[in-house]
Image: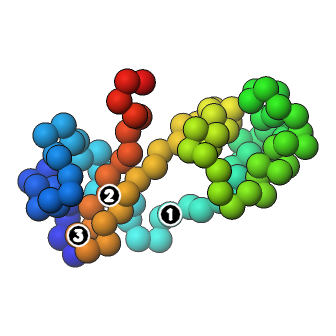
Amino acid sequence: MPKPSKASLQEIPELDVKRAKVLRRGPRPGRTLRLPLRGMRDAAGKTQAEVGAALGSDQAEMSKLERRDDMMLSTLRRYAEALGARCEVSFVFDKTGHRIELGEPDGK
């Protein structure tokens, strides 16, 4: 698989790469850490009540949120912020190996 570069992004016709920026070429094999929301919260040393308070909600709602398999991206971003993190969403093109970070919507 070729290493992605700014020049190789031009080979993806679905993307306008005029403002694209290659942040990195992705993690090395075997270095990906995957945790559910609860695991992220535990690792951050926060309780459901603390995260809920930061989101203007309560512990019961955080319990429900952590068990969901689908949620709005804005909710996930706010949850990450409550943990002192930021949420990054990437599109990964298996055919070329390109990993492109999804930015904030225009106008924000």
Q: Amino acid at mark 3?
A: Thr
Q: Which mark is residue 24?
A: none
Q: Who comes first in sequence, dot 3 or dot 1?
A: 1
Q: Which residue is mark 2?
A: 99
Vertically, is 71 above or below 12? above
Q: Residue 15: x, y in percent?
A: 20, 52
Give the spatial CA distance, label 2 vs label 3: 9 Å
Q: For the C terminus, which image quadrant?
A: top left
In the rendered structure, which amino acid carries the disc numbered 2?
A: Arg
Mark 1 crowdedness (10 Å alpha carbons): few <14, some 14-19, many ≥20: few
- Farthest residue toward the right? 60
Residue 4, position as x, y percentages in the image: 20, 60
Residue at position x 65%, y 57% from top? 70
Does residue 39 appear in the picture of this structure?
Answer: no
Q: Earlier in the sequence, mark 1 or mark 2?
A: 1
Q: Position of residue 92 (x, y in %)?
A: 35, 62
Question: What amino acid type should be assigned to the residue bearing mark 1?
Answer: Thr
Q: CA distance from mark 3 to mark 1?
A: 19 Å
Q: What is the x, y in percent for residue 36?
A: 69, 58
* Mark 3 residue element: loop
Q: Which residue is mark 1?
A: 32
Residue at image mark 3: 96
